[in-house]
C-alpha cells in the first residue's frame, strides 16, 4: 500500500474533536465553576492552540502528499509536504514540552510536602530545558534550513546526520516517559497525605494519574523512531511515527484536562438531583486564585480573604472545601 494518508486524516479528526471538547470543558470548569483559572490552565490553552496548528499543518501536508510514496508525488508536492512536516515537527516538540509543564503546575496546586514540590519543579525544569534544546536543533538541523524540504531531511553534508536525529528522538521519548510516569505516580503520594475519605482518595488518585496515560503512546512511538532515517521516501516511511505523535499529544491534552473536571461532574450531579450538594467553590463567589485553601501552589494577583485565627467554624469550612476542591 503506497498511500496511508487516510489513517492520518482519521486521527486528525478524532483528536481535533476530543481535545477541543475537553479543553473547552476545562476552561468552563476552572473559569466559571470553581473560579480558579491558573497558570496550568493558561498553559493548557496554549498547548491546545499549538496542537490545533499542528493538526492544521498536517492536514495541509496530507493535501500535498504526506503519507504517500515518493513515486506518486510531483517535485512541487513533495517539497510542500516536507515543509509542512517540518512545521509539524516543531509544533510537536513545543506541545509535548508545554503539556507536561502544565500538568506540573496543576500538581503544584495540590502539593504541600516540599519533597513533592521539588520533584515537580525539577521534572518541569528538565522538561523545559531539554524541550528548548530539542526545538533549537529541530529548527537548525539543516544548513540552509530549506534543505529539509528542498531535498529531504538528513541530506548528507547539509543536515545533521540521520542517526543523530534518531538518537535524539530516542532520548526525548525516554525523558517524556519518565516525566509522564512521574506526573502519574506522584499524585498518589500527594493525595494520600491529605485528610480525605478512602473512597475519595482512590477516585482522585485515579483522576490525577491520567497524566501517565500519554506514556503508552510515547512507548509505541519509540518503536518507529528509526523511520526518521529513511530520507528519500520520508513522507511514506514516517506515517507511523507521525500518527503516534498525534496520539501522544492528543491523549496528553485530553487526560490532563479530564483530571480537572471533578467539580464540573459534581455540579452536574447536583443539578440532576443525583447528589445533595454541588462543589463548594461554586457557591463561594471569589475571584480567580482566592480559593487556595492551602492546597499548594496557586498564584494569584489578589490576596485571599482574611481568616480570623481563632474561628473554629471557619476552620471546619476550609477543611470541607479542601476535600471538594482537590481536583480544582
Image (cartoon, rainbow, N blue to C red):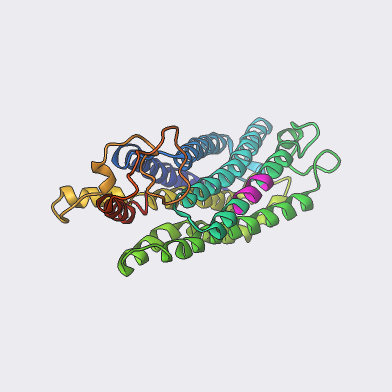
Q: Is residue 31 left or right of residue 62?
A: left
| Residue at point 39%, 58% (across, down) | 207
Q: Is residue 247 left or right of residue 136?
A: left
Give the residues drawn in magenta, as a range.
Answer: 123-130
Locate residue 23: give its quadrant: top left
- Can residue 183 be seen at all in this image of the molecule? yes
Locate residue 274: give its quadrant: bottom left
Query: Residue 21 or 81: which is nearer the viewer?
Result: 21
- Can residue 234 be seen at all in this image of the molecule? no
| Residue at point 63%, 45% (across, down) | 128
Query: Residue 18 or 258: which is nearer the viewer?
Result: 258
Number of numbered discs overlaid on the protein picture: 0
Q: Position of residue 99 (x, y in %)?
A: 52, 46
Q: Is residue 229 magenta?
A: no
| Residue at point 51%, 59% (across, down) | 113
User: Most extreme residue toward the right, as rendered?
Assistant: 157
Locate residue 226: give its quadrant: bottom right
| Residue at point 59%, 51% (across, down) | 121
Q: Position of residue 46 (x, y in %)?
A: 50, 36
Amino acid at each position: 500500500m503506497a498511500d496511508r494518508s487516510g489513517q492520518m486524516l482519521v486521527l486528525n479528526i478524532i483528536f481535533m474533536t476530543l481535545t477541543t471538547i475537553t479543553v473547552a470543558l476545562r476552561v468552563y470548569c476552572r473559569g466559571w465553576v470553581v473560579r480558579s483559572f491558573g497558570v496550568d490552565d493558561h498553559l493548557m490553552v496554549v498547548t491546545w492552540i499549538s496542537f490545533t496548528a499542528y493538526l492544521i499543518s498536517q492536514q495541509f501536508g496530507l493535501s500535498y502528499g504526506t503519507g504517500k510514496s515518493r513515486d506518486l508525488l510531483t517535485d512541487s508536492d513533495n517539497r510542500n509536504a516536507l515543509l509542512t512536516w517540518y512545521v509539524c515537527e516543531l509544533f510537536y516538540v513545543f506541545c509535548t514540552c508545554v503539556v507536561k509543564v502544565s500538568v506540573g503546575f496543576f500538581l503544584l496546586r495540590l502539593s504541600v510536602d516540599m519533597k513533592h514540590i521539588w520533584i515537580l519543579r525539577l521534572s518541569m525544569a528538565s522538561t523545559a530545558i531539554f524541550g528548548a534544546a530539542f526545538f533549537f536543533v529541530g529548527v537548525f538541523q539543516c544548513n540552509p534550513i530549506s534543505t529539509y524540504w528542498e531535498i529531504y531531511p538528513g541530506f548528507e553534508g547539509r543536515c545533521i546526520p540521520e542517526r543523530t536525529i534518531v538518537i535524539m528522538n530516542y532520548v526525548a521519548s525516554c525523558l517524556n516517559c519518565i516525566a509522564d510516569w512521574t506526573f502519574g505516580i506522584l499524585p498518589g503520594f500527594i493525595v494520600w497525605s491529605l485528610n480525605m475519605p478512602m473512597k475519595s482518595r482512590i477516585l482522585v488518585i485515579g483522576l490525577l494519574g491520567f497524566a501517565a496515560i500519554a506514556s503508552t503512546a510515547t512507548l509505541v512511538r519509540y518503536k518507529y523512531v528509526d523511520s526518521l532515517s529513511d530520507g528519500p521516501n520520508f513522507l511514506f516511511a514516517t506515517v507511523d511515527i507521525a500518527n503516534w505523535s498525534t496520539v501522544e499529544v492528543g491523549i496528553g491534552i485530553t487526560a490532563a484536562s479530564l483530571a480537572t473536571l471533578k467539580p464540573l461532574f459534581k455540579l452536574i450531579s447536583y443539578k440532576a438531583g443525583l447528589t445533595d450538594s454541588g462543589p463548594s467553590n461554586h457557591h463561594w463567589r471569589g475571584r480567580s486564585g482566592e480559593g487556595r485553601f492551602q492546597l499548594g501552589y496557586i498564584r494569584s494577583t489578589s490576596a485571599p480573604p482574611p481568616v480570623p485565627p481563632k474561628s473554629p467554624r471557619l476552620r471546619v469550612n476550609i477543611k470541607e472545601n479542601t476535600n471538594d476542591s482537590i481536583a480544582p
